[in-house]
Image: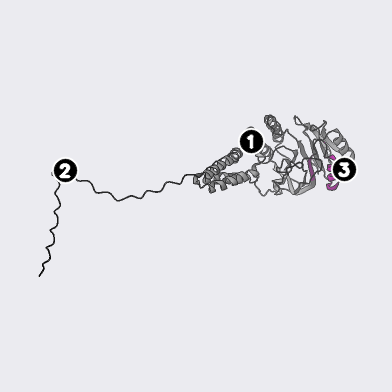
Amino acid sequence: MNSSPADPAPEATPEPHPGATREPAPEATREVAPAPPPLRPRHRVMAWAAGLLMVVPALITACRALDTDAVTPVPQLLAFLPWLTVPAGLALLLAAVARRRVLTFVAVLVLGATAWSTVPYMPQTVISYGLPLARVKVIASNVEFGQGTGSLIELMRRERPQLVFVSECDRACRGALTKTFATELPHYASVEGEGSVGSILLSSYPLRDWRMIPSTMGMPGATAEIAGVPVRLQLTHPMPPVPGQVSLWKRELGRVKAAVAAQPTGPMLVAGDFNASQDHAAFRGILAAGGLQDAARRADESRAPTWPAEGPLPPFVQIDHVLVRDFSVREVRFPDLPGSDHRAVVADLDLRGPR
């Protein structure tokens, strides 16, 4: 009978040498978060484009929040403030597509701040007035070197205003208006001049206390007696804030501010081409100094554009205003004025008695 061989004896584990050191057992493998993937070339371009698109909205929004018109190009770009939400929104889209979280967060902040800055500047508060004393229709118009005079005459015949504030009314314009409306608007205060220098304020009410604010272009003012109440009237037309004359623009708007601040009480109408929108600090300073309200804001029309009304671009900014004190606002409209690069402002107002 065959016998199976015996199982081999297990090998003995060799004992370590007394002087030898034991190697440590390997630790458990730790999980390491994967590094963020590198930007693809097109994502890198998108991130750079998003950053560049945010620069102008961020700068202009910051100036608006700090209540400053600063220097060129800020005053010019403030006129575009509502439209700056477009590049800010595009920057957010590009940052999101590029998958850059921090950049996307910054873009959200810039877009939100820009949109918030476009909220109308004057709160809609309920104002307590006395009884209405008289209904007054006002037209403010820039006729562009007199070229829109014929259109203005047609508008005045249709609307039959009691007060008309006309900027850039040259001598021919002045003669046409005073002759055509000698019966309806027999009283006027004017600054004679050619081109953009001339201005005229026509009134169906007697005028007194004629004064002119010193300026490059005419800014006449006077006091009208309406329903037995003296009402201060002031036409405005400062120089525009083009590069190289921003300081002059600020200085002339500052003179308007000083003029309205000098008469802190009583009814007042300040109207014309301000060459400034609600987003300019110099314009808001006039409102604050005189306790004035923009009639367009009271009529929920504070973003209705009035310039430029001719040329390749549609109107994009409201720089023509009728500002009121102790008047309630019924309606404000902005009719086109063929021949001029401005739309006119027609405001239906009620002069109110004391509270």
Residue 75 in view here: yes
Q: What separation in Å lies between label 1 and label 2 (alpha carbons)? A: 79 Å
Q: Nearer the viewer, mark 1 or mark 2?
A: 2
Give x and y (percent) for residue 6.
Answer: 11, 63
Q: Which of the image's four quarters has the N terminus? A: bottom left
Circle 2 residue: 20
SS assignment at label 2: loop
Give x and y (percent) for residue 215.
Answer: 75, 30
N-terminal of the pair, mark 1 or mark 2, is: 2
- Density class for disc 2 (Cα within 10 Å; few <14, some 14-19, many ≥20) is few
Residue type (three-letter) at the residue carrying disc 1: Val
Q: Nearer the viewer, mark 1 or mark 3?
A: 1
Circle 3 residue: 184
Residue type (three-letter) at the residue carrying disc 2: Ala
N-terminal of the pair, mark 1 or mark 3, is: 1
Horizontal side of 175 relative to 287 (left or right) equals right
Q: Residue at horizontal 85%, vertical 38%?
A: 187
Horizontal side of 55 relative to 290 (left or right) equals left
Report the residue that reaches farthest toward the front.
1
Give x and y (percent) for residue 94.
Answer: 56, 46
Give the magenta range. Answer: 137-160
Image position of 235 with respect to 92: above or below? above
Give x and y (percent) for residue 301.
Answer: 71, 48
Q: What separation in Å lies between label 1 and label 3 (alpha carbons)? A: 43 Å
SS assignment at label 3: loop
275 in the magenta segment = no
Residue 355 in view here: no
Would you identify the image quadrant in which residue 46 lies?
top right
